[in-house]
Image (cartoon, grey):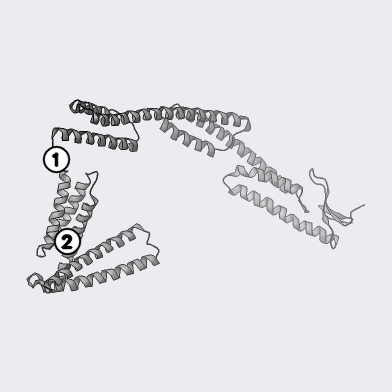
């Protein structure tokens, strides 16, 4: 039966809409006539705009994106989509555009594959050189980096893909097998050294129980010399074994000294003695109000000296450090208090002690309350600004809290002294 209504690209027949044959595609049914045949044809003419837009969008994407090769599949899929698209229009320019894009992408992919082939062959040579290096740890780092580059490098032509992958993988597998053997041997040597050092420790304990203590002394000293020749253990393990060895030696020589009647005076680190002396000196000067400015200057100098000395020491008594820091803080707060009071009471030191204390208590109480109020406002603002977790903010808060704490300690001391004088 002949078509009743048609246009350049399609026609209607028996209530159905057909697309005419074009390129290598035969005519086929694409829809139904719902109202009039003219309206049905126009609907599919309008719908053809969707196909044009999809091709235009794909063409634009290919021009804009950096990884163009990934769009080849989309182009092939778009050609299949157009072949079955239900619309009426000139499909030939659309297929021509897609063919042009596909040809361009295949050429580009081929170029990239040639380039990738060169890169992967170079990476294989780099992997071979790294894998044969004497430094296993360095070789491991190099191979990990090379593998990362390999993964990031795009595909090569299929005829080379399997061979390249197998070659590269074989290099890695051979190296990591050698690496495993290397570390097994290294661990075996470490275990032997640990066993040897543990044997020294056990030997010292056995020598401590031996009947001939004089003969044992020489043997213990020989073990001490041998200990120094055993190197190359992990630091934590070496430290733990050394502590046990030192403890065994201390126990041995404690027994030796006891048998021989030798009194061993504990060795005091002269640096520690100096730290204690500085702390005690400052503590003795806290009540010297007249010379407080000079004492504060000395405390500042001692702070610098303290840092220089402690930087050379492996460990420090925390209680001593806190004691020193506390006396310095008290001196600084005391000096500040006396300086503030001097503006209104320049002859403070000439007044009776009770009057001095009353003036000092009033001023210190005022400063403490003022600083506490300022700190509370600062913390509230920091919380509002969500800055409480920042290190500079926390550092400032902690410093202010310490200053307020020192003021309160001094204030308590003043009050206690005043009560004692009033009740005397």
**Depth check, front residue: 316 or 377:** 316
Could you tell me residue 282's position as x and y percent?
Answer: 14, 57
Could you tell me residue 321's position as x and y percent?
Answer: 22, 52
Residue located beneath label 1 in the image: 265
The residue located at (29%, 36%) in the rendering is: 244
Q: Is residue 114 left or right of residue 306?
A: right
**Depth check, front residue: 89 or 180:** 180
Q: Is residue 248 left or right of residue 52?
A: left
Could you tell me residue 351's position as x and y percent?
Answer: 8, 73
Q: Secondary structure at mark 1?
A: loop
| Residue 338 seen anywhere in this rendered image of the structure | yes
Could you tell me residue 164's position as x and y percent?
Answer: 57, 30
Q: Give the label, 2 or 1, closer to the camera.
A: 1
Q: Which numbered circle lies on residue 152?
A: none
| Residue 345 seen anywhere in this rendered image of the structure | no
The residue located at (67%, 45%) in the rendering is: 75
Q: Is residue 135 left or right of residue 66?
A: left
Q: Is residue 242 above or below residue 10?
A: above
- Mark 2: give few (<14), some (14-19) or many (20+) Cα within 10 Å: many
The residue located at (21%, 58%) in the rendering is: 326
**Farthest-out residue, front:** 211
Q: Is residue 342 left or right of residue 128?
A: left
Mark with earlier residue (2, 1)? 1
**Farthest-out residue, left:** 350
Q: Secondary structure at mark 2?
A: helix
Find the distance from the CA under tag 2 to the CA under tag 1: 36 Å
**Depth check, front residue: 186 or 305:** 186
Q: In which quadrant of the rendered view does residue 360 lie?
A: bottom left
Q: Which numbered circle lies on residue 331?
A: 2
- Mark 1: give few (<14), some (14-19) or many (20+) Cα within 10 Å: few
């Amino acid at each position: 039966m002949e078509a009743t209504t048609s246009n350049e690209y399609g026609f209607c027949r028996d209530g159905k809409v057909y697309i005419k044959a074009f390129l290598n595609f035969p005519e086929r049914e694409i829809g139904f006539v719902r109202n009039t045949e003219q309206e049905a044809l126009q609907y599919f003419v309008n719908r053809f705009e969707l196909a044009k837009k999809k091709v235009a969008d794909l063409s634009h994407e290919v021009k804009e994106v950096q990884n163009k090769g990934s769009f080849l599949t989309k182009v092939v899929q778009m050609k299949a989509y157009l072949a079955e698209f239900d619309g009426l229009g000139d499909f030939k320019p659309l297929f021509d555009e897609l063919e042009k894009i596909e040809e361009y992408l295949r050429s580009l992919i081929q170029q990239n594959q040639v380039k990738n082939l060169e890169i992967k062959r170079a990476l294989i040579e780099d992997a071979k050189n790294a894998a044969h290096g004497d430094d296993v740890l360095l070789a491991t780092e190099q191979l990990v980096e090379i593998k990362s580059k390999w993964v990031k490098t795009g595909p090569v032509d299929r005829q080379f893909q399997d061979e390249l992958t197998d070659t590269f993988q074989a290099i890695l597998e051979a190296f990591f097998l050698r690496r495993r053997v290397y570390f097994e041997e290294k661990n075996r040597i470490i275990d032997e050294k640990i066993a040897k050092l543990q044997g020294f420790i056990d030997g010292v304990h056995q020598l401590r129980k031996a009947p001939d203590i004089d003969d044992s002394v020489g043997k213990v000293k020989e073990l001490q010399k041998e200990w120094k020749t055993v190197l190359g253990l992990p630091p934590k393990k070496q430290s733990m074994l050394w502590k046990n060895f030192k403890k065994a030696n201390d126990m041995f020589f404690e027994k030796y000294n006891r048998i021989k009647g030798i009194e061993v005076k504990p060795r005091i680190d002269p640096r520690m003695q100096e730290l204690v002396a500085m702390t005690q000196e400052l503590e003795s000067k806290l009540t010297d109000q007249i010379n407080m400015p000079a004492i504060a200057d000395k405390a500042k100098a001692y702070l610098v000296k303290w840092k220089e000395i402690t930087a050379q020491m492996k460990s420090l008594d925390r209680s001593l450090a806190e004691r020193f820091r506390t006396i310095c803080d008290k001196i600084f707060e005391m000096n500040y208090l006396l300086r503030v009071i001097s503006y209104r009471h320049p002859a403070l030191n000439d007044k009776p002690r009770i009057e001095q204390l009353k003036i000092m208590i009033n001023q210190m109480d005022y400063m403490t309350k003022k600083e506490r109020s300022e700190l509370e406002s600062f913390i509230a603002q920091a919380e509002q600004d969500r800055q409480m977790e920042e290190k500079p903010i926390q550092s400032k808060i902690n410093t202010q809290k310490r200053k307020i704490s020192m003021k309160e300690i001094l204030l308590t001391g003043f009050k206690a002294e005043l009560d004692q004088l009033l009740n005397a």
